[in-house]
Amino acid sequence: QVQLVESGGGLVQAGGSLRLSCAASGSIFGITLMGWYRQTPGKQRESVATITSGGITNYADSVKGRFTISKDNAKNTVYLQMNSLKPEDTAVYYCNVDSIVPTGRSWGQGTQVTVSS
C-alpha cells in the first residue's frame, strides 16, 4: 500500500509564495512520473506540473514561469514551488505518483491553497 502525504498548503496574499511537498511511502517501486493537479468546485481536476523519472518537466500554460516542480529521488518526494500567486490559483492541490509497483497512479489526499486578492 502506498501513502502520499502532502503538506505546505495555506492562505497567502496575491503575489506571495508557497511550497508544496508530497512524500510517497509504503511499498512503491519504479516511480516513472510525479506531478501536481488542482481542482476547484464544479471543475475537472487539471494538471499543473509533472516531472518524469529522468527529470523532464511539463507545466500548464497558466503557471509557466511562476511554478517550479522538483523532486528528491532519495526521499520519494515531489515539490511544487509556487511564486507570484494569483487568486485564480486558489484550489485543492493533489499530488500524483505513477509507478511500476503498484502499477498505475496513486493520489494524495489534497491540500488547500487559497490566494487572497
Image: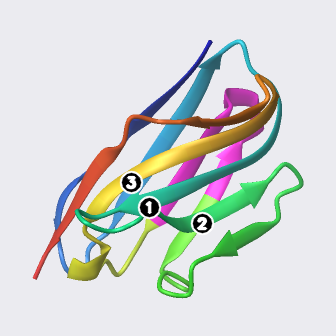
Q: Is residue 90 magenta?
A: no
Instruction: Name the residue located 68 percent from the left edge and 32 percent from the top edge.
Output: 76
Q: Which residues are magenta?
A: 70-81
Residue 45 image label = 1
Q: Are marks 2 and 1 in contact (CB under 8 Å)?
A: no
Quadrant position of residue 8: top left
What residue did someone put label 3 on? 93
Instruction: Name the residue located 53 percent from the left edge and 68 percent from the top edge.
Output: 48
Instruction: Name the residue located 28 percent from the left edge and 62 percent from the top edge.
Output: 91
Residue 21 image label = none
Residue 83: image location, x then y, percent: 40, 74
Residue 49 image label = 2
- Tell me, yes or no, if residue 45 can be seen here: yes
Sequence-earlier tag: 3 or 2? 2
Front-most of residues 70 and 110: 110
On screen, residue 34 above or below 90? above
Provide the secondary structure element on which disc 1 rests.
loop
Give the mark toward the camera: 2 or 1. 1
Quadrant position of residue 59: bottom right
- Rate crowding at label 3 as few (under 14), some (14 to 19) or many (20 or more) other CA atoms within 10 Å: many
